[in-house]
Amino acid sequence: MKRCLCGALLLLVTPLASAVEILRWERLPLAVPLQVGQERVVFIERNVRVGTPTSLQGKLRVQSAGGALYLLANDTIAPSRLHLQDADDGTLILLDIAAEPVKAGESPLEPVRIVEAERATPREEVGAPAERPVPPTPLPVALTRYAAQSLYAPLRTVEPVQGLGAVPLRDDLVLDTLMPERPLTYRALAAWRLEDLWVTAVRLRNTSSHWIELDPRRLQGDFIAATFQHPDLGPKGEATDTTVVYLVTRGHGLAGSLLPAISPVDAALNLPRSRDDEE
């Protein structure tokens, strides 16, 4: 009789000991409260990079391993936001945390598991016309859209792209040949790769006192696609004097598609010297 009673007690206790709070990610910040001095585990099943505010330095320890985050508050923390970004496809998940001292008799907080929200499928109606299949987005369009969202849109709205990843920029890029007849300065900001395509975001700044119309046909180089963030540039010093161009290349980064820089040549150096010059 005692053995049966013990077995029943174990069955009752086990589910409580392994309880996990399920949170569904639906592009809304997820609340994850913490207790000072007690570690809380967040299962996310993703390889993520964690962005923390500078105000949490020394107050919050964050460790990541095997698709799980281990959060330990060393002090009281006011409501703050953590940014979790998937290293593979760029998906961004926002966590709102706050830490308070443990109250007397308060039990430790259970682990948290973050799952993707199930996408609702439209109900099939009798006699409804069949939906046309949506064609896949061309890769240059997907790359350019992701780059533009990464630079101009809030991080939480950036649409993830499977297989897309950031790539480092070369230090020896010479961009003055992009539109040499235009009074512009250039600076490469970031680059991403998807399969055999690269997209590089280059900042353009007007150095003249008049408006400049931006035409992709004036770009010099071997590009699959080129898109300007704005159609023109305002005079130097105005808020409109700066924009970004997104250059898509195939098989290599931007450096392999730029025209070589040509140094100015003094034609007089190649003329034959006269006897008077030699004397």
Image (cartoon, rainbow, N blue to C red):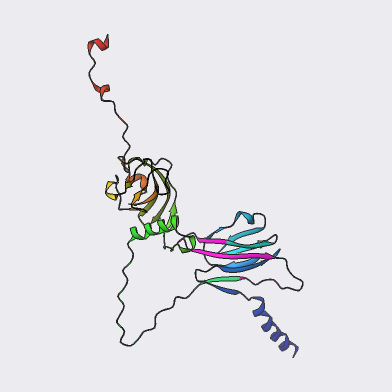
Depth order, front residue of 46/93? 93
Give percent across and percent down for residue 152.
44, 56
In the depicted structure, whether residue 86 falls above or below residue 251:
below
Quadrant housing residue 7:
bottom right
Q: Is residue 220 left or right of residue 38?
A: left
Give percent across and percent down for residue 83.
54, 61
Determine if residue 202 is in view: no
Residue range highlighted in magenta: 82-111
Q: Residue at x 31, y 73 (%)?
A: 133
Which residue is outermost to the right?
A: 104
Count of marks placed on residues: 0
Give percent across and percent down for residue 234.
37, 47
Q: Residue at x 32, y 71 (%)?
A: 134
Depth order, front residue of 27/135? 27
In the depicted structure, whether residue 112 falls above or below residue 54:
below
Give percent across and percent down for residue 235.
38, 44
Point out the image quarter for the C terminus.
Answer: top left
Q: Is residue 172 left or right of residue 69?
A: left
Q: Residue at x 29, y 28 (%)?
A: 265
Q: Is 89 included in the stretch rendered in magenta?
A: yes
Determine if residue 138 is in view: yes
In the depicted structure, whether residue 212 falls above or below residue 113:
above
Point out the image quarter for the N terminus.
Answer: bottom right
Q: Is 243 included in the stretch rendered in magenta?
A: no
